[in-house]
């Protein structure tokens, strides 16, 4: 079994890098400040439930039914109430989510519970933290969440696996969850109703998938910006379309910033003087397109940062004055909708739209590159011996399919509300669907960038000039070191993936 290689404190903030690292073993620490917050929240929950006036105070999920059945009494035994929370949510279907998304979601869940507002037992936080030192990952079906009361169904599967029920992965192998816990050296979680409800009543799957998708799209955006510069240099294009005065006049900060980045990448470059006065839009309008994507990604950055730092649960427990009298008291239980994943739904839908247009740009640039009418006289499909060889013809066909798939998945999910749960959940955000589809599309965008990179590497092999800008030359050299020229024809699926992996490293700051 792998051993932890990194540390994430639950007292600090989370970011995409921490969520990425959660796919592998890492050390999650619970310091005394976190322990004190969690203990205080647990005492408040018990005081509100069992202290003076507790018999007349209703706390959702502690002694009630769930969802539309809140008006009915729950089970009187705490352990039974845990089963009451989870059993009916075992209704998910479809393939398992990637274990990396599940572990990232549980890291988010642990961080939310560690804020001390959920009234959970300290053992829940400690045992979640212990899980991350292993490769244990609950098996969670993809379909079933509407993202309204959080990700109820997927998080219920995750919670059941932590109790030793259902299935889980260990070292990448799927097995009964109890066996996986034992092999990992973990004990099954024992929960009461409050603990169980707090584990499922959050948007952690939605937020994790959105954050990971954003991270991947940001990397692809940086890579595509660099690849556009390399394309510009290989073809010998005039770089007037990047003029700083021109882009300032456009008025959009993203375009100004992207244009500045592209000018820096192209420092030292010399136009060939043989290109048309105005390039096709896939080159000439690249700073405007990539700039608009940058502006949109900054909005998604803000939504994800808020979700990573917020508390997603219901109810929440706050120390302070009695809500009825205003007098100093033990505190209050507040029932509300902090589990409603609408911000992430809108953000993930926007992310999907950005991904679709970035993917379209990469595909159009590759199409330009393989077309002898527009690529400066390079051979069709960049084949070394057209007809006897076919170069990137298959790769270009595949990119068309990738773009079509991304476009299909970009249909907004966050406005497709359907009432459910006896109209208790009469509006729902469908953020989980939006986030998972954005995550899928981000993977395809990486392959589109890898396909374009492969084309640029092949263009240099079949007659394109050596880049004149040193930074463009460095990128081409890195691609050439990783990928052999296509001569003669060979299957290129693994080469596209290799280029995508190289760009993933290149695209991270």
Image (cartoon, rainbow, N blue to C red):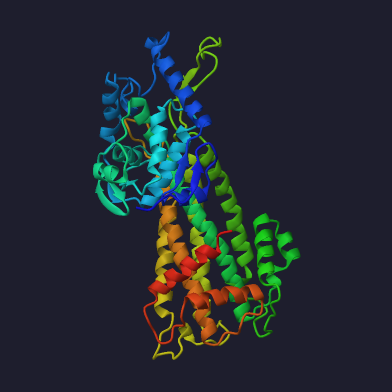
Total number of numbered labels? 0
User: Looking at the picture, does residue 455 appear above or below residue 113?
Assistant: below
Q: Nearer the viewer, residue 429 or 102?
A: 102
Q: Nearer the viewer, residue 170 or 41?
A: 170
Residue shown at the point (58%, 48%) measured from the top left: 299
User: Looking at the picture, does residue 290 appear above or below residue 69?
Assistant: below
Instruction: Name the side, left or right, on which 35 lies relative to 467.
Output: left
Residue 221: image location, x then y, percent: 55, 61
Work out which quarter of the rendered image holds the C terminus and state it.
bottom right
Q: Nearer the viewer, residue 267 or 225?
A: 267
Instruction: Name the side, left or right, on which 421 lies relative to 382.
Output: left
User: What is the residue that sits farthest to the right in this orientation?
Assistant: 245
* Res. 245 visible in picture: yes
Residue shown at the point (42%, 34%) measured from the top left: 125
Residue shown at the point (56%, 11%) measured from the top left: 326
Residue 370: image location, x then y, percent: 49, 80
Image quadrant of residue 273?
Answer: bottom right
User: Looking at the picture, does residue 409 appear above or below residue 107?
Assistant: below
Residue 218: image location, x then y, percent: 54, 57
Image quadrant of residue 240?
Answer: bottom right
Q: Nearer the viewer, residue 177 or 336?
A: 177
User: Looking at the picture, does residue 154 appear above or below residue 492?
Assistant: above
Residue 290: image location, x then y, percent: 59, 62
* Res. 426 visible in picture: no
């Amino acid at each position: 079994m792998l051993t932890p290689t990194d540390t994430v404190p639950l007292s600090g903030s989370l970011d995409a890098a921490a969520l990425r690292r959660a796919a592998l073993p890492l050390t999650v620490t619970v310091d005394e400040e976190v322990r004190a917050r969690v203990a205080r929240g647990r005492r408040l929950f018990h005081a509100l439930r069992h202290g003076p006036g507790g018999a007349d105070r209703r706390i959702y999920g502690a002694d009630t039914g769930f969802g539309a059945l809140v008006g009915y009494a729950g089970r009187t035994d705490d352990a039974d109430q845990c089963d009451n929370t989870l059993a009916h949510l075992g209704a998910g279907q479809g393939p398992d989510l990637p274990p990396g998304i599940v572990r990232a979601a549980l890291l988010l869940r642990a961080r939310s519970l560690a804020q001390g507002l959920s009234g959970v037992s300290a053992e829940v936080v400690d045992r979640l933290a212990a899980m991350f030192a292993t490769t244990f990952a609950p098996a969670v079906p993809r379909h079933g969440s509407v993202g309204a009361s959080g990700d109820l169904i997927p998080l219920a599967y995750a919670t059941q696996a932590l109790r030793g029920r259902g299935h889980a992965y260990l070292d990448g192998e799927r097995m009964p969850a109890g066996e996986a816990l034992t092999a990992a050296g973990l004990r099954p979680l024992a929960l009461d109703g409050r603990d169980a409800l707090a584990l499922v009543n959050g948007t952690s799957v939605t937020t994790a998938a959105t954050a990971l998708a954003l991270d991947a799209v940001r990397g692809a955006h940086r890579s595509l910006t660099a690849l556009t510069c390399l394309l510009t240099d290989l073809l010998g294009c005039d770089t007037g379309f990047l003029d700083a005065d021109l882009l300032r006049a456009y008025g959009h900060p993203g375009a100004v910033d992207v244009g500045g980045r592209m000018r820096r990448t192209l420092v030292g470059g010399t136009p060939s003087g043989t290109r048309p006065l105005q390039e096709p839009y896939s080159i000439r309008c690249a700073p405007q397109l990539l700039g608009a994507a940058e502006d949109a990604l900054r909005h998604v950055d803000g939504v994800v940062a808020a979700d990573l730092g917020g508390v997603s649960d219901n109810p929440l427990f706050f120390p302070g004055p009695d809500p009825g009298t205003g007098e100093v008291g033990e505190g209050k239980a507040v029932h509300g909708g902090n589990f409603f994943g609408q911000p992430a739904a809108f953000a993930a839908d926007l992310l999907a739209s950005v991904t679709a247009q970035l993917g379209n740009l990469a595909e159009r640039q590759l199409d330009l590159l393989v077309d002898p009418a527009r690529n400066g006289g390079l051979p069709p499909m960049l084949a070394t011996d057209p007809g006897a060889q076919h170069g990137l013809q298959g790769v270009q066909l595949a990119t068309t399919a990738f773009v079509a798939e991304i476009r299909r998945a970009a249909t907004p999910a966050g406005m497709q509300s359907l009432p459910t749960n006896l109209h208790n959940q009469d509006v729902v955000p469908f953020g989980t669907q939006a986030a998972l589809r954005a995550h899928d599309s981000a993977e395809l965008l990486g392959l589109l960038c890898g396909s374009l990179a492969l084309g640029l590497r092949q263009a240099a092999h079949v007659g394109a000039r050596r880049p004149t800008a040193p930074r463009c030359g460095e990128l081409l050299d890195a691609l050439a070191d990783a990928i052999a020229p296509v001569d003669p024809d060979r299957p290129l699926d693994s080469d596209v993936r290799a280029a995508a992996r190289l760009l993933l490293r290149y695209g991270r700051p």
